Amino acid sequence: MSILDTSNTFPDDQRQQLSSLAREVLGRCQRQGASQAEVAMSVDRGLHVNVRGGAVETVEHTRDRGVAITVYFDQRKGSASTGDLEADSIATTIEQACHIARYTEADAAAGLADADRMAARFPDLDLWHPWALDATTAIELGRRAEAAGRAVDPRISNSDGAGVGSGESVSVYANSHGFLGCERTTRHSISCSLIADDGHGMQRDYWYSSKCAAADLESAEAIGVRAAERTLARLGARKLSTRECPVLFAPELARSLIGHLVAAVSGGALYRQASFLLDHRGKRIFPEWFQVFEDPFLPRGQASASYDAEGVATSASALIADGVLQRYLLGSYSARKLGLQSTGNAGGVHNLLVRANAGDATALMQSMGSGLWLTELMGQGVNTITGDYSRGAAGFWVENGVIAYPVDEVTIAGNLRQMFTGIQAVGDDVDTRTSVLTGSILIDQMMVAGA
């Protein structure tokens, strides 16, 4: 029989049951000799449908459960996990974690985060907004998105499908310091991908909306129309000759630049000495006006949380101030390896806000004059050890501040050091669909390799 009843009690009873089970697991770990222990548990459920050509392709109901247990025998660590909440599975997982720890080499940096860093304040971050979505309604929304997109222009010749999804998650993290935190979150989305054909070639593009509250989603029709407009705009794409020019990253691509910053200043890369920003804390790496702020307490934020993956209290603070790197992003292990303190970033960042100093993409194109406006990136040619950057790209050539024609099959290249210092502007057209909240980013000069 399952320890946890997942039939109808979601989420209030499950939070209580997960909390009780977490305490029981910690006690059993300590009775088996662990000097410290931690456990993370989650129960998720969701509905996801895909529609293509008006026909239903998939209807998927999900119900996932997981337990991850870590024990420390002094400074010897063992971890094990299971997707089964049955009593026998929990017992076996505890035994496996303890067995691993007994035969693991001691690591001076191993152990729970410091007890005095545990979160004690748990504000309501407005992350729980269940959507009573059934398969019939989800299918209808998908059909509406797709139909609206296909009705825009006869050149929209086909569809790659429309998707509608809704998910709910309840999770608990507890450790032997006596800390226990519970979180519950929801995430809903609508997407549409279309294909256009003008007789000379085919192009594909998409649009989507993702929010924790269904009321905040764009309408299905608006998503379909936006997908169609983006797809049609790509028809007649040309190649560019190789050149150096300004490059404007659309907001959904600009966040990847901030993602490279995050990777380079995260503890794992730093203590392994695998970052081009090694020893750059306190140094200017962006223009003087550039600001990036972390806000874990943003209402309905994609990555809002009052504690990190180790129970350490999160805090709102600058990552980049006046172009200067203020701190690294550290969990307790990487912090100890570096002789520093955890920054409450075990498990990642909590909503990065990049301050705008300009208008929207149209205004930035006018400021740019002539250059490349990027709307798609391909490939993974980014080396965070050296900062070397090279990726396939597509977008639009801008001439005298106005879009001249679509462009594809080009490669953009540079080095992240120069790209960061070469940022000329950040737009106010912020993409709110992820935890990196930035508008368009204009870089003064990059190499564009084309025909």
Image (cartoon, helix red, strand yellow):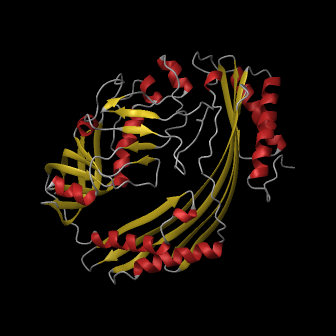
Q: Is residue 158 left or right of residue 425?
A: right
Identity of the residue furthest to the right in this view = 1
Write the residue at 25% across / 46% down: 425
* Image: 96 above or below 252: above
Q: Point out residue 386 in the picture as x, y percentages from the top left corner.
A: 30, 31
Q: Is residue 364 left or right of residue 124?
A: left
The quarter holding residue 62 reads bottom right
Q: Point out residue 346 in the picture as x, y percentages from the top left corner.
A: 55, 33
80 or 54: which is nearer to us?
54
* Image: 382 above or below 193: above
Report whether residue 115 is seen: yes
396 or 340: which is nearer to us?
340
Write the residue at 77% across / 40% down: 19
The quarter holding residue 359 reads bottom left
- Disc tally is 0
Q: Point out residue 65 in the picture as x, y percentages from the top left corner.
A: 71, 49
Report whether residue 450 is seen: no
449 or 66: which is nearer to us?
66
Specify the quadrant that holds the C terminus.
bottom left
Write the residue at 52% across / 62% down: 216
* Image: 108 above or below 447: above
Q: Point out residue 16 in the picture as x, y percentages from the top left corner.
A: 79, 45
* Image: 147 above or below 393: below
Write the residue at 32% across / 81% down: 155
